[in-house]
Image (cartoon, grey):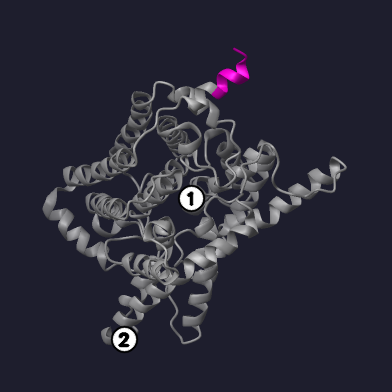
Amino acid sequence: MPADQDATAGVSAKVPVADRTILAVVAAYALSFVVFGLVIDGPREVFAGLGAILISRDTLLTDYFGVGGIGAGLVSAGLLTLAACAIYAWSRAKMTGTAIAALFLVLGFGLFGKNLLNVWFIVLGVALYARFRGDPFATHINTAFFGIALSPIVSEILFSSLLPWEIAIPLGAGTGLLIGFILPAAAAQLFKAHMGFALYNMGFTAGLVGTLIVALYKSYGFVPDPVFIWTSGNNLILGPFIGVVLLSMVVLGVLLDRRAMFGFRQLLRESGQAPSDFVAIAGFGATLVNMGLSGLVAMAYVLLVGGDLNGPVIGALLSIVGFAAFGKHPFNFIPVMLGVFLGSLAKPWGAADPSILLAALFGTNLAPIAGRFGWHWGVVAGFVHSSAALSVGAVHGGLNLYNNGFAAGIVAAILAPIIIAIRAGRDGRGNTSPTSSTATPD
């Protein structure tokens, strides 16, 4: 059998996995966070820490490990993700690569900004939008759980010292509902701006929506104060735990599908341009292998540059893990990380500085640029992103948790058309379409 036919046969032979099994695997990883958190600090300390987390302001950067302790931060993130998994099960949502990415973002950002109190108004707002449209909630559930990027706005209003509680509670709830109601339509339209070359489309959308809302509140004198809570010195505690979690994904992927490594090699040839559902392309087993290996590569980068493992950094690692089911793999995101690293050498900051470390990890949502146009353009994208990510936070007051998604959306919306035009001119072609035989169709 020719090699190309053998490759086709291998992909078609991927082992199908039921939605309930995929959801159970995600829930098991969330449960591991709960168990490990309780082992570290014990129930009494965790309970006290959870209370502190619920009433924290959550603006970037608010490391929940510094607010309520490591144990409470892990338990909070795990419980929130388990609640999200229950809603996915109740709605009978399809467990695609997008759904896996959404749930791992809940788990990751549950360590620094999303909690068991501030997310639900936005989720309910999306549910109201689905009801208004006459759609089942499952149709918009991924948007709902991506959209809780703006949940710090709810906390900022609810716990504002400038507002009496009889105003803060209905205003915070109403703002969350409004955000959830407008996000689905806005996200669908704004996707066209970056053409799928920025995987965190909701980060781009939330950045623009958050900018508008913050500008509105600022005009009435409601200005959010900056927050910076960043813990360090816990690498020896958290490193082994996260390493075991990531290694277990590789092992589980191979156990679920004996052709998982073959499927992983297939994924390495994908551009990653959204939408790229790796579960549909190569199966859940291969996707798990990609998730685990991608997370290990990212964690190795953090440790090599001398970075801290804390709530925000682990959240960034889990964003890579989640989107390794929907567009990222080591071949297309390493060039972007390299670009951000080179930016740290050429500019007045260090690779381990909090903002630039997060830019290197979250900036990997520009991976489709490297996958579609080549590694050198990925380096360029990362280099540009290293500056953009440090500048856009001021416009939304730190209330959009996906700040790097916002910055990357801007970079992709400008850089991708330029690359396409350069390539078209060099090849003597007038066609500037971003799609080709090697691109993932939109």
> What amino acid type should be assigned to the residue bearing mark 1?
Leu
Q: How many marks?
A: 2
Q: Report the front residue among 108 and 24.
A: 24
Q: Is residue 402 left or right of residue 435?
A: left
* Front: mark 1 or 2: 2
Farthest residue, direction top: 1
Contact, mark 1 vs mark 2 (Cβ under 8 Å): no
- Few, some or many residues within 10 Å of mark 1 (<14, 14–19, 20+): many
Residue receiving disc 2: 167
Residue flagged by tag 2: what amino acid is it? Answer: Ile
Q: Position of residue 84 (x, y in %)?
A: 30, 54
Q: Position of residue 368 (x, y in %)?
A: 60, 43
User: Neighbour class for label 2 at 10 Å: few (<14), some, many (≥20)?
Assistant: few
Image quarter hosting the N terminus: top right
Coordinates of residue 286 in the picture (x, y in percent) = 44, 30
The residue at 49%/70% (across/down) is 210
**Residue shown at 43% from the left, 82% from the top:** 222
As for residue 240 lying within the magenta part, the answer is no
Left or right: where does residue 165 sit relative to residue 46? right
Q: Secondary structure at mark 1?
A: helix
Residue 89, given in percent of the width and then of the height, sits at 29, 50
For label 1, the residue is 358
Residue found at the far right of this picture: 428
Q: Is residue 281 above or below residue 390?
A: above
How would you classify the magenta stretch by its main secondary structure? helix
Q: Is residue 350 visible?
A: no
Query: What stretch of residues is rendered in magenta?
Result: 1-8
Q: Earlier in the sequence, mark 1 or mark 2?
A: 2
| 295 over 166 or under it: above or below | above
* Horizontal relation, residue 85 to residue 338: left or right: left
Relative to 344, say whether 16 is above or below.
Answer: above
Q: Which residue in the rendered view is the most extreme toward the left? A: 44
